[in-house]
Amino acid sequence: MRKPLEGIKVLELGNFVAAPFAGKIFGEFGAEVIKVEDPNKGDSLRNWRVMHNGTSLWWYVHARNKKSITLNLREEEGQEMVWELAKDADVIIENFRPGTLEKWGIGYEDIKKINPSIIMTRISGYGQTGPYRNKVGFGSVAESMGGLRYLTGFPDRPPVRVGLAVGDSIAGLYAVNGTLMALRARDNDPLKRGQYVDVALTEAVFSLLEGVLPEYDLKGIIKERTGATLEGIAPSNTYICADGKYIVIAANSDSIFKRFAHAIGRPEFAENPTYLTNNGRAENAEYLDQVIEEWTRKHSQKEVQKILDEAGVPVGPIYNIEDIVRDEHYQARDMLQTVTLPDGEQVLVPGIVPKLSETPGSIEWIGPELGQHNDEVLGGKKLNQQK
């Protein structure tokens, strides 16, 4: 069977993380993704973090299955080429500051005149409207203003960040969702009309805050940092084992807690009315955590996991990347795939998510060299751009 997005042509005008992350997913599931890069330096991600022979290893993950062409979008000739490419494109995805594409004459209303069916997916810090629309927005700031950073860390210490571009990736996922919805709506429209999809980094992060907003609005509660626990949900925490390793235990449903109590040798907890519901356990979370860690300190991490796995209690070690590579489940699920770099060296890259039973995604090639597909995509046309 064909891949689910075969026949869909995506023009990626994005840079850095959010829009390219979305473009990666489109490419994995069969869309033709044409990535437009600056002819002088390419996507900034090519030069970020750990390098191998002059190219970021992150790049090879982020740009797989994409075709790279070089256009100077600040010049009329580059803008005209975008017009030509947009005529038969299904999707344009971009993450410039709002108004930038309009300034260049390639905004949504401009492209819509030549291709009424176009879907333009726009990712920005604060969205295409509102008083902050013109502010420069990055994922780190979005994580802060979206409320996530305030909740990350321990209550007696300053807020911290997760060591990855979480805000950008969340926005990229919403961009994929929104684009697929817009394509579905276009398919159902007799006139095949497109639309634009507006994804704000701050809003993507804010959407993850669960019940934090109504809790504040009705009860005046400002949720604070709680370290490794989930406030109001117990027991769910990180515990140290006899070998000095940490393990996460989430025995916070009523039925699971009963099994957990027997597994750790405290059957009386399973019959105590105080602990039969989450509310009672949450009120006594500190005491329960103390009892649980007294138990985990008597066993190695592997012993704790074996006992609780057999009892049907959610449990797992805290992995670093070496642990993930060695894990048999990641291996069995094809989440560690080997690709060959341009110099012939092989390297592991993350596999495909999600997994479709009949039309799965795949890695067809790694991130391309800058302008590698100019001739194929542009038909050999010569452009006045600096190489």
Image (cartoon, rainbow, N blue to C red):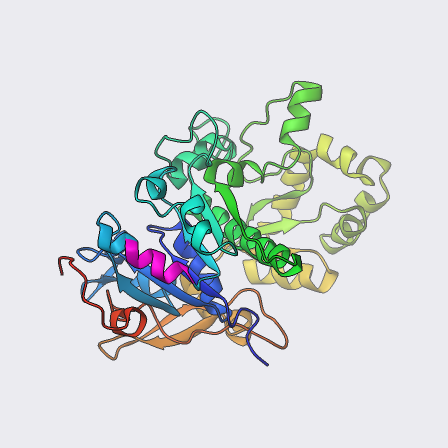
Give the residue drawn at x 81%, y 39%.
Answer: 277
225 or 89: nearer the viewer? 89
Q: Position of residue 12 (x, y in %)?
A: 38, 57
Image height of 300 relative to 210, above or below: below
Q: Position of residue 250 (x, y in %)?
A: 66, 49
Q: Position of 127 compared to 342: left or right?
A: right
Quadrant of the rendering where the N terminus is positioned: bottom right
Q: Which residues are magenta?
A: 80-87
Q: Position of 327 compared to 382: left or right?
A: right
Q: Position of residue 24 (x, y in %)?
A: 43, 62
Image height of 152 relative to 106, above or below: above
6 or 89: nearer the viewer? 89
Residue 82 shown in magenta: yes
Image height of 342 relative to 132, above or below: below
213 or 327: nearer the viewer? 213
Give the residue drawn at x 53%, y 31%.
Answer: 225
Residue 195 shown in magenta: no
